Image: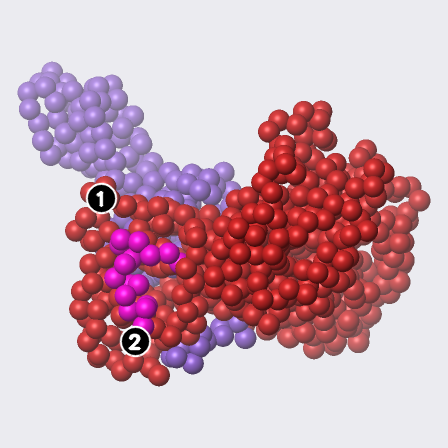
Chain colours: A purple, B red
Amino acid sequence: MSKHTLAVLVENSPGVLARVAGLFSRRAYNIDSLAVGPTENPKISRMTIVIDVQKHALEQVIRQLDKLINVIHIAELTPSDSIQTELLLVKISATDKNRFDVDAVLDTYGAKIVDHDGTSITIEATGDPAKIGDLLSALEKFGVIELVQSGLVALERGSTALSDRTLSPQSIPTADDGGQADYQN
Amino acid sequence: MATKNGTAMSGASALVKSLEASGVDVAFGIPGGAVLPLYDPLFDSKLRHILVRHEQGAGHAATGYAQVTGRAGVCIATSGPGATNLVTPLADAAMDSVPVVAITGQVPSAAIGTDAFQEADIRGITMPFTKHNFLVTNPADIPMAIAEAFHIATSGRPGPVLVDVAKDALQAQTTFNWPSSISLAGYNPVVTPANQSIEDAAALIAQSSKPVFYVGGGVMKANATPELYELAELLNAPVITTLMALGSFPGSHPLHLGMPGMHGSVAAVTALQKADLLITLGARFDDRVTGKLSTFAQNAKVIHADIDPAEISKNRFADVPIIGDLKATIKALIPALTKALAKNRPDLTPWWRQMNSLREKYPLGFDVPADGSVSPQYVIQRLGKISDPDSIYVAGVGQHQMWASQFISYEKPRTWLNSGGLGTMGYAVPAAMGAKVGAPDTTVWAIDGDGCFQMTNQELTTCTLNNIPIKVAIINNESLGMVRQWQTLFYEGRYSNTSLESKRVPNFPMLAEAMGCVGLSCDRPEDVDKTIEKAMSINDQPVVVDFRVHRDAMVWPMVAAGASNDDIKIARETAPDWDSQEL
């Protein structure tokens, strides 16, 4: 098993997330994380899905995803040809006594404090999963009260966009009173 | 006559006009609250609506219609329970890749999500087993949704599509605009196979000394029977047709070895096991065909041609995948293979010697019951002999289905209908009804079990009232026969809940008569022929024959579930005599 990051362009229409999630569930594929949001094109949403599968199973996942009518394009993004990052918000116990130690950790990981009261501080950090993992380990000793992670998002390096390659669908004439078009032949 | 774009009308009228524009001539359905607005303009339409007795019947009828005609079948139901009753036939159509368009009414859009009366999230429910589905809440979107639904259902790998329309969208006024074209960014099925794949396949075939054509239902869907015939004769290799492909290659052709799988012929099962090359055309390596996958066709390379890329290497790795329409694929393979064979033509004589010896030694057969009762296989065999050569046979699910696949020779495509993938008991009567509507001049026989028949026989009333004279042969062994067979073989004969007592009640001929059919009964071997002939002579109303058959007949050969195909049994605890074979 190994982790793979898929960028999936989908139509921005109701039920698409349910279709994708349902597909993973019924075909017994494990999702590590799934992040979804709008894109530069209001008609298209983009999902970043991280899955833990064998290479052979990955091809199956991609082909099954591609069968969903609302799925427009799927690309596997590797760590070397893409920027992969996630967002972490974590609340830890912090008092004046250990504050100096906390700051040292945050400096090391480029994390920042976004909220604090007398007994706790909330930290925001972004980065690849390895960095976020290391940061969390370093913060553990202070006592993690609560945390939330966004799931990975990924973008290809370079000047091209995934959507460039995908948004020129064929136009197929409809049948008109003459009976159903025979698409089989 | 096409309705002019821009004409003002209700959403319901726009839906009817859209169905007409899609070429729909018949729909099966039942009205109800949420879909009621649709039934008003339907009343005036030239579209024939057949009022069924249960929505499941509407769904299977649409499936039967589609399987016979190759066009999309249409069913209509109301919201909530009407829609959920379509769930089984839609799942059935998905498993067997049948183009069906289901139209359901939905509660008014303002009520969606409030647990309103007769509300069910049918779009959510059917997501796993529709090719696609829609929820339409804006009347202006109706024509495009219908156009897309028919395009998706019938193109690529066919399948069911559901269009759920909110009641207020049916009631509201809109202007009708039939789209001149469809463009779906995420849906462009590959139709034309890649040249390289065709060349690779031809080269591999020309090196094979033990090739087998493993033919699935895709060949039927692609109407590629003539092309398959030509390709098979060109190579002169054994042809095996799966349960979904029976009739796509003539059953009586000397190249045909029969059906593979759990109840396949010894020759067909062994051909797959011993082949060095599987030329897989529109089949999907289903577990009922492969048996234990890790021991399936271990020495074979695989060419896998399919229109659905997701089938490639799903269950079995494909050495040469070919993605595309099968008609186009086989058409392209013929010249490529002709060329390759001109350079190198392997001698298939030893391979044929093995296959012919298996075929001679292990033909399909059955024992005649010693007590003089009727053998179920005999009834089915006689039916296939006596009925017109063009007859269409529609089976339920179970022993009778397997016997009907074994003991009738299907010579033409679309003459054998059954529920292959989902295994839906109750499929036969409504699917036969749909088949007869699609092929009104052809004799349509439902071959049903006494268990299956009791699930959906109410559609015989629909048949009587709508002049759909199907014929039904109930193979009445007063049991859930296939389950009983498994209890005999794997549960020490403990017949837990498989006895239906259908020779006591119901009285099938009386039940049939009550629904306006002719009811016949037969319980002696010597009466089988004349009973079938009598049924054949009645063409103005449905006929139901209660064939009261021997209870303990079993389906052989058999590969037990999860076992290797190498462990095929030709009778209880009897394996083929491999030692005498040169395998």
Chain label for disc 2: B
Q: Which residue is mark 1?
A: B116
Q: Is residue B123 left or right of residue B375?
A: left
Range of magenta residues = B29-44
Q: Nearer the viewer, residue A60 or B454?
A: B454
- Residue drawn where x is 20% and y is 63% of the image: B171
Amino acid type at circle 2 is Trp
Q: How far across and down, in percent of the image, does residue B535 sit?
A: 67, 60
Cα–Cα gap, marks 1 and 2: 32 Å
In the drawing, what numbered circle is on residue B264? Answer: none
- Residue drawn where x is 21% and y is 26% of the image: A146
Q: Which residue is mark 2?
A: B178
- Residue drawn where x is 51% and y is 60% of the image: B464
Q: How far across and down, in percent of the image, does residue B315 sit?
A: 59, 48
Q: Quadrant of residue B398?
A: top right
Magenta highlight: main SS:
helix
Give above or below for B504 relative to A173: above
Q: How far across and down, in percent of the image, does residue A131 sit?
A: 30, 36
Give above or below for B12 relative to A14: below
**Mark 1 Cα within 10 Å, few/some/many (few <14, many 20+)?**
few
Q: Is residue B165 left or right of residue B529?
A: left
Tags 1 and 2 on a common chain:
yes
- Mark 1: which secondary structure? loop
Disc 1 versus disc 2: nearer the observer: 1
Is B33 magenta? The answer is yes
Outermost residue to the left: A118
Q: Nearer the viewer, residue B307 or B399?
A: B399
Outermost residue to the right: B580
